[in-house]
Amino acid sequence: MQRILRINLQSRNSALKAKRKKALDSYLKDWKEYEQRQTLTVQEKSKHIKRERESRREDWKLGPLAPNRDTGKQQGFYGTVTNLFYQGPSFPDKLYKGPKSKGSDFVGGEGLETEHLEWEGIGNEGNIVEDDRVVVVSGRSDLVGQIGKVKSLAKESKEVTIEGLNLADVEIPQNFPEQRAKSHFTSLELPIPLADVRLIHRHTDPATGKDRDVVVKLLRGGAPYKAQDPNSPLPRHTRYIAGEDIEVPWPEVEIPSYQAYKGDTTRYDVEAKTWTPTVYNAPVPTAAWEDLSQVIKYRRDRTEHDEEYVRMKVLEDARAEWYMRRKIQGPEDTLIEEKKRLAAQKTERIKQMGMSEQTREVIEQMMREPKPKRRKAKAVA
């Protein structure tokens, strides 16, 4: 019994270890993609700034003789920025600190139904939503101190877009030919890191009774929790000014409404069980099974595949073999391949030779010998 328990414990530990390794590999992969995208964005920004400085310096030196730069292949794109600036790289999901469920879910949706867990946290993540008034407190000098309303919030990249701030002419990508034919660029607000903004709260001073704007340095989210209306973008928790426990109300947002039509499929129709298989009936309705059995590729007794399917499989195998042949191998890889080839040849020779007479005699002799009886251990008094 102890051996069974030990084997069970080892199996469980091995499964947990494999699960943790898989989660770690996924996290490192996401983090590597984020770093690559961030490096590419920083390089593009540096190139853009360097190019603009050189052009500005050249224009200042030449004066009226400065060249017209809006010409050539990039005519119409002078002064625009790439769309890499419009959307930053996404952080791994593990680094997101805000609530992960919707505000319209039941209270306790952050954990299991039996646990009734809810999100609690400090900071801007999860406590700043669209239509909030915020102020930029760090970053570019021309943006610091500017106040605006949050236009959109990107949880994956931890960035906010503020109405009328950080405007730039963004180049329209080539995969939008219709829009690109009308105009080469469009004016958009570039995102700002969420950590660079602070919420502005309209607070009533209890001493004077006057309202004034207060810059909230730190926000806290916690109880009480309230399930929002369906399709509402607001979370379920309540936010406060950290340290003061002054409640900060959520902004009034317009909840999108959806119109139902007669031809729409309802949820009850989708979830309704229209076929119940039993021991005496097939798991598939007879009519559906007859329709499928008439098609050759769905039959069990088929003897051949479609010509197009066979042709694609042959091409796939040939392409895989070609990739393996053109792969650059070092001395170590060549040695490993040679060892595998020799081992395969040795295995094939052994299979062809079969069992030798000497080996057969040894096995027969071991089978004829009587097995020794196991002696029971005597208890020591």
Image (cartoon, rainbow, N blue to C red):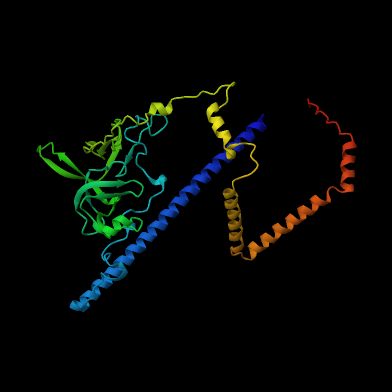
For the image, the number of numbered tags is 0
Above/below status of 106 relative to 201:
above
Direction front: furthest residue: 294
Q: Is residue 286 above or below residue 32?
A: above
Residue 131 % position (x, y): 22, 43
224 and 318: which one is in front? Answer: 318
Q: Nearer the viewer, residue 289 or 134?
A: 289
User: What residue is shown at x 59% (from left), y 52% (from top)?
Assistant: 311
User: Which residue is depicted at the point 66% across and 31% down?
Assistant: 2
The answer to whether one can see residue 171 in this image is no
As drawn, 336 above or below 270 = below
Q: Residue at x 16, y 40 (%)?
A: 203
In the image, 340 versus 134, the foreground residue is 340
Task: Determine whether, in the image, residue 127 is placed left or right of residue 213.
Answer: right
Q: Quadrant of the N terminus?
A: top right
Can I make out residue 54 in this image?
yes
Question: Residue 261 sits in which quadrant?
Answer: top left
At a point 30% along the width and 71% down the height, the residue shown is 72
Q: Position of residue 362 (x, y in %)?
A: 88, 44
Horizontal side of 297 relative to 111 (left or right) equals: right
Of residue 312 and residue 216, the one placed in the foreground of this image is: 312
Horizontal side of residue 48 vs 201, given as left or right = right
The location of residue 381, given as percent across then percent down, is 78, 25
Q: Name the spot of residue 25 as percent of width and height, x first.
A: 50, 49
